[in-house]
């Protein structure tokens, strides 16, 4: 029996050659002693369910990596760098056990006097899952069992030496403010009916603590207007380099939307505990059942592959956009016919101006030159608030700032006027909302201004054409990172007739440059290098 047990323990996939997370800040360091302590604390606990019940909680490699990153990456002031961890992973990979272990570590092992740790879920039944695992872990650990009071009726665990507690809360009964939070464990965040509990627990409740930890652990959901999807998007953006937040630790295990959901290789890549806590036979059986019953496919993809099966996906395939990058010198375009698109947004937000140069022959491309502005005084604030590297882009020359705390339109008008001496700007398309004065000023400088509506009628043809030209690699851009960010942020709205337009409501991140480019592209397609020429008259549009 003992030999069999040792064999089981030995077969666990252990972490080797650990290196700290890529998201460790430059001024942070890895404290091996702190990480070792957190790992040892958890591994003194025991599994509570199934064939593993009663056996030591041996962390699998991916679990240990998370614990070492969260508890071992330390700021110069001696406190932990990461305050929020977002862990998204398919079911049966050991989420509840890891969440319970983290809750106990924060409550009993973190050296915090009167620590308040809360377990949150959609309802008390869901929240009780992690609580019940935690209580079983306490009972199976003699050292904790004699130091901890379990108040089952209140769903509370009290660690007597520091008078710290772990308390279950649900979205049904969050009600009160006034929490002094050291830790929050959100189990199955995707089941939250709204964002109220999340906001109460994470917005300022831990300000009195030096290193609060918000541990969010979930499977993918289906509601893209949820707080979970908001956090998912943030995690995805950080993982892919679109956002920077040194306090946020993202982990997402799952399959791409276009992956073959019946492939065992895809299952392995999506389930880090496959072969450890999950048997391959169980996944095979679930897959076979989904093949026989098409209604089960979405559930399989969501729960086993961690896919947001009903989500609205970003419109532009970014690998196609990236393949249109061409290193060209702006000076080569001087004197050429081009068309401008101007999106002002608001005086405190990004202003975008994009020039589109129509092709001069069949083998030529539509060349794109974008320009962006932000108010100088609000730049640092926006970097902290939006977690977008505006300051880096400004230093690199991809973004300009204007004096003051609002966009200085006079500066932009002068800039466009100078562009007009280099390029043959035939027309400038603009959204008349908020741009009346600037349009008049630009007309006074000799430019031709064209009003451009933001409805389906005006936006649909050039939006469809943009996709077609991108897929055909007829677009040529210089890899401008701000424009790329805008393109990646586009979500599309569609009417019953099949017309499309960028959806500014769903595109929660900025798309100003993309909208400006679409308007300019429309004029370039309609007018070309010679007035009266229109590609719309010559080719079929891509129907999306």
Image: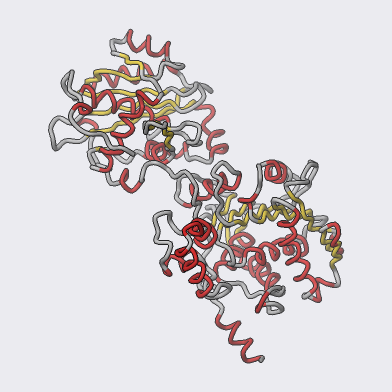
In the displayed image of the protein, which residue is found farthest to the top? 444
In the displayed image of the protein, which residue is found farthest to the front? 292
Q: What residue do we see at 56% from left, 33% from top? A: 381
- The colour scheme used here is secondary structure
Left or right for 17, reference 161: left
Left or right for 402, reference 220: left
Along the viewing direction, whichever of 380 and 464 lies nearer the viewer: 464
Q: What residue do we see at 31% from left, 29% from top? A: 461
Percent coordinates x, y for residue 221 in the rendering: 56, 51
Along the viewing direction, whichever of 15 and 536 lies nearer the viewer: 536
Percent coordinates x, y for residue 422 in the rendering: 23, 22
The quadrant in which the C terminus is found is: top left
The quadrant in which the N terminus is found is: bottom right
Q: Quadrant of residue 262?
A: bottom left
Q: Is residue 417 above or below residue 386?
A: above
Q: Is residue 128 above or below residue 442?
A: below
Q: Is residue 122 above or below residue 467?
A: below
Along the viewing direction, whichever of 529 and 15 lies nearer the viewer: 529
Percent coordinates x, y for residue 234 in the rendering: 53, 46
Along the viewing direction, whichever of 172 and 411 lies nearer the viewer: 172
Percent coordinates x, y for residue 166 in the rendering: 78, 58
């Amino acid at each position: 029996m003992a030999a069999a047990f040792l064999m089981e323990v030995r077969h666990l996939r252990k972490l080797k050659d650990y290196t700290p997370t890529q998201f460790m800040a430059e001024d942070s360091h890895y404290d091996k002693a702190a990480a070792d302590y957190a790992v040892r604390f958890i591994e003194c606990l025991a599994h509570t369910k199934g064939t593993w019940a009663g056996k030591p909680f041996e962390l699998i490699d991916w679990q240990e990596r998370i614990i070492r990153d969260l508890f071992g990456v330390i700021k110069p002031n001696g406190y932990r760098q990461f305050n929020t961890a977002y862990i998204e992973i398919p079911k049966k990979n050991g989420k509840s056990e890891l969440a319970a272990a983290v809750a106990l570590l924060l409550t009993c092992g973190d050296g915090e006097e009167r620590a308040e740790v809360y377990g949150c879920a959609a309802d008390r039944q869901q929240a009780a899952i992690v609580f019940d695992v935690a209580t079983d872990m306490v009972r199976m650990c003699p050292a904790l069992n004699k130091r901890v009071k379990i108040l089952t009726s209140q769903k509370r665990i009290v660690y007597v030496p520091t008078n710290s507690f772990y308390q279950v809360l649900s979205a049904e009964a969050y009600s009160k403010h006034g929490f002094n939070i050291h830790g929050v464990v959100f189990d199955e965040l995707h089941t939250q009916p709204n964002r109220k509990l999340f906001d109460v627990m994470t917005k300022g409740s831990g300000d009195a603590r030096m290193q609060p930890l918000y541990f969010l652990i979930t499977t993918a959901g289906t509601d893209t207007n949820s707080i979970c999807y908001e956090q998912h998007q943030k995690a995805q953006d950080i993982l892919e380099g679109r956002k920077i937040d040194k306090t946020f630790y993202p982990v997402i295990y799952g399959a791409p939307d276009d992956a073959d959901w019946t492939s065992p290789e895809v299952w392995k890549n999506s389930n880090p505990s496959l072969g450890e806590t999950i048997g391959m036979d169980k996944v095979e059986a679930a897959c076979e059942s989904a093949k026989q019953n098409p209604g089960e496919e979405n559930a399989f993809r969501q729960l086993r592959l961690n896919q947001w099966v009903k989500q609205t996906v970003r419109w532009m395939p970014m690998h196609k956009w990236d393949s249109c990058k061409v290193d060209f010198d702006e000076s080569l375009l001087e004197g050429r016919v081009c068309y401008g698109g101007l999106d002002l947004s608001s005086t405190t937000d990004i202003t975008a101006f994009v020039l589109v140069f129509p092709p001069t022959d069949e083998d030529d491309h539509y060349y794109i030159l974008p320009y962006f502005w932000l108010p100088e005084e609000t730049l640092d604030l926006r970097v902290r608030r939006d977690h977008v590297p505006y300051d880096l882009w400004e230093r690199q020359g991809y973004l300009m700032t204007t004096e003051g705390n609002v966009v200085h339109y006079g500066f932009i008008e002068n800039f466009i006027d100078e562009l007009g001496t280099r390029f043959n700007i035939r027309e400038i398309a603009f959204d008349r909302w908020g741009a009346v004065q600037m349009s008049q000023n630009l007309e006074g400088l000799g430019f031709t201004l064209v009003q451009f509506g933001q409805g389906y009628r005006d936006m649909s043809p050039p939006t469809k054409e943009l996709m077609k030209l991108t897929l055909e690699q007829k677009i040529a851009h210089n890899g401008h990172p701000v424009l790329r960010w805008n393109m990646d942020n586009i979500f599309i709205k569609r009417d019953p007739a099949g017309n499309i337009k960028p959806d500014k409501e769903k595109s929660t991140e900025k798309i100003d440059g993309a909208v400006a480019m679409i308007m300019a592209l429309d004029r370039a397609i309609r007018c070309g290098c010679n007035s009266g020429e229109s590609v719309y008259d010559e080719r079929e549009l891509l129907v999306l």
